[in-house]
Image (cartoon, helix red, strand yellow):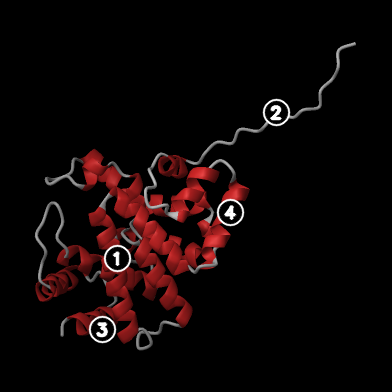
Amino acid sequence: MPVKHNATVPIKRTVPSTLKVLQKMDNPKGNPLLAAIKQFADNPQKLQESLEKLLNEGQEKVCEYLLDIMAMYNKNTAKHMKGVARIAAKFIKEKGEKIGLNAQEKKVTIIAARIHDFGKRFTPLKFLTKPGKLTPMQKKSVDKHALRTKQFLEQSGLIKDEFFKTAADLAEKHHTSVDKLNMTKKRTIEEEILELSDVFSALTMKRDYKRPMPPKEALKLMQETQEKESLWNPNIFKEFKDCYGK
């Protein structure tokens, strides 16, 4: 009689789309988050164990790892993400209590600011650096970055951390929050801060396709936009101008 073997065939897991992209990256500096994804992208349990160890270093440290991954792909986007976080942090420090933020909301908003554009890691680089106007197809691809940020946090397992879970929701909304179709929905203070910080950073930062705008000129343009379209909460926008118009 033939001998029966009880050996089990190993299960081959499908690697989530965002993790598959990161798996192909080089890791010259030994970024711990990227290393974990490259090694355990097909093993959710092992990846989660690695993420929990990294989260023990603090959410801010994990944000630094994410920014480093982005910088390896596109330095300008990483610089913008840091800029938005810096703008939001200064505003929160000076005006946070006045506009009604508690300690947890302050922390979540800054985390969201630091990671909000991470989804651009999954956008073709030629679209991010194109000096001219994007085609409708290219713009559609770039516009998906907010959703891809949340998608990455879900697929990696970082969303299991309560701060990253809330930050993921904020990051997903950071462009659609000022869409005129959504103006009937009341936005949170955190959404307002992220949007204002994102716009201010975009205007005052040099990009491949534009010159940097002086802060006062940027605030003037934002004021003109506010008068025409009422995009932001008037009280929060007033405090933002007070913070950055000095």
Can the viewer see residue 204?
yes
Query: 10 Å neighbourhood of mark 2: few (<14), some, or many (≥20)?
Result: few
Quarter holding the N terminus? top right
Secondary structure under badge 2? loop
Residue type (three-letter) at the residue carrying disc 2? Val
Task: Say whether disc 1 or disc 3 marks the residue closer to the N-terminus.
Answer: 1
- Look at the numbered discs 1 and 3 and tell me whether their residues touch, using CB distance below 8 Å: no
Q: CA distance from mark 2 to mark 3?
A: 62 Å
- Say above or below: 13 vs 171: above
Q: Residue furthest front?
A: 29
The disc label shown at residue 82, or none: 1
Secondary structure under badge 1? helix
Secondary structure under badge 4? helix
Residue type (three-letter) at the residue carrying disc 3? Glu
Task: Say whether disc 3 or disc 4 marks the residue closer to the N-terminus.
Answer: 4
Quadrant housing residue 90: bottom left
Q: CA distance from mark 1 to mark 3?
A: 21 Å
Q: CA distance from mark 3 to mark 4?
A: 40 Å
Q: CA distance from mark 1 to mark 4?
A: 26 Å
Q: Nearer the viewer, residue 5 or 91?
A: 5
Task: Say whether disc 2 or disc 3 marks the residue closer to the N-terminus.
Answer: 2
- Say above or below: 128 vs 10: below
Q: Residue furthest top?
A: 1
Residue type (three-letter) at the residue carrying disc 4? Gln
User: Which residue lies under the disc numbered 3?
Assistant: 239
User: Which residue lies under the disc numbered 4?
Assistant: 48
User: Which residue lies under the disc numbered 2?
Assistant: 9
